[in-house]
Image (cartoon, rainbow, N blue to C red):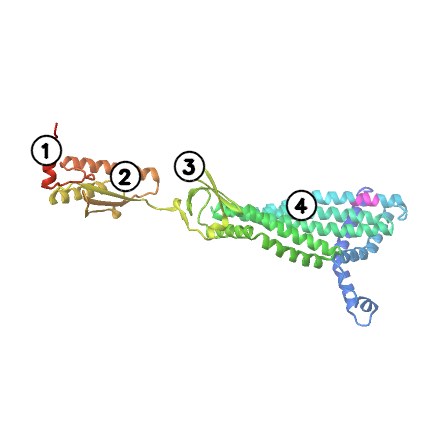
Amino acid sequence: MRFINPMRSLIRFFQLAAAFAVFTAAPAGLVAQNDAAAPGTPAAASSSGTDAPTATESIVEHLNAADHASDKLTDSFLLKLGIDPDSSTGRYLAAAVIVLLAFLLRRVVIRAFFALLNRLLGKLESGLYTRLSHALEKTLSLVVLIIGFVIALKVLHLSPALNKGINYAYAFAIMLALFWLALRVTGALADHLHALAKKNDLGVTAFMPWIKSALMGIVFVFGALVIAQGMGANVSAFLAGLGIGGLALALAAQDTVANVFGAVVVAVDQPFRIGETVQIGAFTGTVEHVGIRSTRLRTPQKTLVTIPNKTMASESIVNLSRITQRRVEITIGLTYDTTADQLDEIVEEIRRITKAEDAVDPDSIVVQFTNFGASSLDIWLLFMTKTADFVPHLEARQRISLAIMRAVEQRGLSFAFPTHTLELGASASRALGKKPKD
């Protein structure tokens, strides 16, 4: 019992100290604001010509307001243990106990709380919740350690100069922890969106890594400016200079900006995906990579073509991988000694051969005698394959062509080829008929 009672006192002390350090911030801030706002008061008179306090100054002010209460709790705790509150040994003992409890709270209580929360909400099967929970757990653990170390240092009654440094270090550490939390939450949201895009096979999947990098960069710059403003830096002058420099940079990087917007257009419109065969301008190939600045194609000759993304906004993009059927046209030329009946019969036979092919869409078949050519009677055959696969379409075309050759051969007909008939006059004939002189 002698051991249990002091431990209960230690736990109660740390709970009260931590709660007081956190929850006295709002009342202290409200009191300070009310005192400053009250007309005719010294606080109002002194603050009328000064700027609003920074975030660091507000945190330091709230921390100073909690010092007196923490001293009372420490003295009460040491007296219960029979230790002189003014002795350095008692102060160091209290500080060590506070640090130990901070580690225990971080490793046991917080982990147990999030484990229970994950068990209760595990049925949601939400990847976003898991990522956010992990980010919040890490940040909360860091904040608990920061508060524990600050309370332990305050208990030691260090010099005013050291106390002032501790106050500002505490304020900076808290802002840095919140900044870290914002980065982790942004990364968790980006990873969740990336997983959803990949699961649904969206075209924006290829752009998610650099979208995440851009979001993280924006949060990083914004957080750095907020921390600098909180520490009392003049951010306004920096932003003014940054605006002028940004204008000069934008003028110098017009092509880069155009490429970035071209990448955004590709991500939104999704005219192609990685692995598809496309024709962009004069180049045809398979898409291997889509980046912020350029898109890379692998041509049929196995060469690598890099196309700037700004070209996507001005060039027509033909996606050869998204055709649903392949169109086949064949012109069959027969000789002029083919009679009309034979021609009508062979047209019907070609129509029958084409309809008998399983790979051909029967609704797309067109077979007609169309033209009196220079040296042939032309029959035009048109059909669409059921699939867009290249090799099966060639195989179907070959089977139909061979069947047409056999049908023409069985009917004693002949395929025409370009011929010219030369008729000579009488004088030319006589000239050619003369025998050469010896």
Q: Which of disc 1 and disc 2 is earlier in sequence?
A: 2
Question: Viewer-nearest of labels 3 and 2?
Answer: 3
N-terminal of the pair, mark 3 or mark 2, is: 3
Quadrant in the picture for residue 23: bottom right
**Secondary structure mostly seen in the magenta stretch:** helix
Q: Which residues are magenta?
A: 93-98
The secondary structure type at the circle numbered 3 is loop
Rounded to the nearest angstrom, the CA distance separating label 2 from label 4 is: 65 Å
Q: Is residue 303 visible?
A: yes
Under circle 1, the secondary element is: loop
Residue at point 31%, 44% (across, down): 386
State how far apart marks 3 and 1 are (Cα). 60 Å
Looking at the image, the residue that sits furthest to the top is 438
- Expressed as whole percent of the image width and height from the top left, the position of residue 136 reads 65, 48
Mark in front: 3 vs 1: 1
Cα gap from disc 2 to disc 1, whole angstroms? 54 Å
| Label 2 neighbour load within 10 Å: few <14, some 14-19, many 20+ | many
* Marks 2,4: beta carbons within 8 A: no
- Residue labelled with disc 4: 138
CA gap between label 3 and label 4 equals 52 Å
Q: Relative to 326, say whether 42 is above or below.
A: below
Q: Which mark is residue 434?
A: 1
Instruction: Give the mark, 2 or 4, whose residue is nearer the N terminus.
Output: 4
Say which residue appears at 11% left-offset and 36% top-offset.
Answer: 431
The percent coordinates of residue 153 (x first, y second) are 82, 47
- Are discs 3 and 1 less than 8 Å apart at CB? no
Look at label 3 and name its amino acid.
Gln
